[in-house]
Amino acid sequence: MTFVPPTPHPTRPDLRGTFGMAASTHWLASASAQSVLERGGTAFDAAVAGAFVLHVVEPHLNGPGGDMTAILATASEPDRPRVLMGQGPAPAGATIAHYRDAEGLELVPGSGALAAAVPGAVDAWLLLLRDHGTWTVADALAPAIGYARDGHPVLAAVCRTIEGVAELFREHWPTSAERWLPGGRAPRPGELVTNHELAAVLERLVAAEAEAAAGGADRAGAVDAARAAWRATVGEAVEEFVRTPHRHADGRDHAGVLTAADVAGFEASFEDAVTVEFRGHTVAKTAAWGQGPALLEALRILDGFDDARLDPSTELGAHTVLEALKLALADRDTWFGDAGSGDESGAPGHGDEVPLDVLLSAEYAAARRALIGDRASHDVRPGAVPGRPTPPAPSLRTSYATDVPAAALPGAPAGGPAAGVGEPTVVVGATAPLNGDGLETDATGATRGDTCHLDVVDRWGNMISATPSGGWLQSSPSVPGLGFALGTRLQMTWLDESSPSALVPGRRPRTTLTPTLVLRDGEPVLACGSPGGDQQDQWQLAFLLRVLVGGYTPQEAIDAPALHTTSAPGSFWPRTWTPGGAVVEDRLGAAVLAGLAERGHVLTLAGDWALGRLSAVTRDPATGVLGAAANPRGAQGYAAGR
């Protein structure tokens, strides 16, 4: 092994067994998924059950009004990784002209209904259940309904999030105050918390399935009846509610544009994954409507270096990894977006396929690799694609000034430079209060973290990696009758017609949700992922290098010190960046950190155990032995299996 050896005392064991494994960001979701496996369900049945539990028990990180992406491989087609696409598009009324000209915005807000894409998560999970599961909707949703109806011990993180935005809820979002401040106060950690409105919504889906089955529908038809009930229930409630202007992240009140027709018009789908080869493995990601190909590009760049230069625990390795990430993220922010279909606007940058054939080619990787020097770059350096004009770079802001009073901005702690409302699951600096799950909450409760993750593998060889997100309780006012909020994924679009990720009705925002599946010799061997917004693929890159090159076990790699660059425009409002910025866990060591600083990296020390919420499951096709590992940071993630 050429890498720095892992710690001899991992925080928890690498689970091993032959029956089934589940790992996620919350122990109740992992246990619920494992319970499905124990009762004969497949990995896909288990993932659906676990995901709906995550909606209930991690409402500050995801919800039914949000989105999800997953990558899976089936036992019947193990060599064909597929993407489950649960990212809803921009509504028909979400035009640049309306947001920029009529609403006076220069960025899509980080909270409020104007930032809402069409909810995609629930339809995607039900599609997975229909096409690859074996259970009924009733059985798969039973754990979530139980926790919502009868209660679950609420996390300290949820309580702190609610406490932080309580003033916002009372003054501007009264429906959220009613939902999350019963009796006028936030719940206390460990109290049983219920969500009867959400339970009732899920029970309507179960009832629709039962009615369809009683009328003679087959299993697929009955699941589709539940999907139709979801669209009808949510669409009507959302359209009526978002018409009323409410406070957004820019400090002003706006009405939303999402309609029942938008909700009715969306259907989740399956797509083939985008893949590259790396050190004898095939790594599978979403297409460039997500950020996943940036990880693939980074792997292609790093594949040309010797193993010793790929160790994130050394000065040279950490520097090399950070520089490769900057180059890949520059291409993400310049070239990636939903190419879509049928757009007749003629706007530059729309309708062109993202040139992944070039961006992921060996020749392109070699040219990008040559740009990595001994010093940290402080520039955004996208590559050129032959025959294609390079789109203009996104706006580069190191801060976002506002004079809006404190507590008036969902996501900004005070007047002055505004904090983001998005996903970075980071604790920066010693003064940031911890939510209990490794997330940072600012003075008004704006949580930099909005995502969950779930991995499952079964004894037959089915495997899935899924990242549900959005619709967290602090993103938008709670919708009456539904018990949850809408998502804010449209903040990843630009109000610039020339951008490949411009806001366009019917187009998906370039999401940060980026699960990973790894194959060897045509068989899935590893599913992994992490919350973290722009950091998701960065933390996964270090994990993959340690496992695939350094020989670490998954738990050793999850435990190892993490790092990421902030030297790229953020995907979340207010979309700022830090030229040359790198956030690191202190456990990298004084010598490594001093060396990185000497090379010009602008370091932020996050603490010893602050970055990443990775989980993973594995399978050895030769023996059938399964494995699982989960993140110890925040004492919340958990793996289960036998």
Image (cartoon, grey):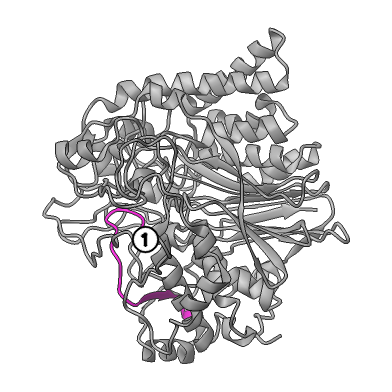
Question: On the picture, is 296 further left or further right than 263?
Answer: right
Q: Nearer the viewer, residue 242 or 162?
A: 242
Q: Which residues are magenta?
A: 571-586
Residue sitting nearer the eye, 266 or 404: 266
Mark 1 burial class by Cα count in 10 Å: few <14, some 14-19, many 20+: many
Rendered view: 223 above or below 352: above
Q: Which residue is tagged 1?
A: 334
Task: Tell me: 281 left or right of 409.
Answer: right
Quadrant of the rendering where the N terminus is positioned: bottom right
Task: Name the residue: 59% across, 35% down.
Answer: 125
Question: Does residue 574 belong to the magenta stretch?
Answer: yes
Expressed as whole percent of the image width and height from the top left, the position of residue 31 reads: 68, 46
Q: Position of residue 509 (x, y in %)?
A: 40, 45
The residue most toward the right is: 623
Q: Residue furthest front?
A: 387
User: Residue 120 in the image: x percent, y percent?
Assistant: 49, 35
Front-lying residue, 124 or 29: 124
Amino acid type at image mark 1: Thr
How many dots with numbers? Answer: 1
**Is 453 above or below relative to 344?**
below
Could you tell me which secondary element the residue under label 1 belongs to? helix
Is 97 within the magenta? no
Percent across and percent down for residue 56 are 52, 38
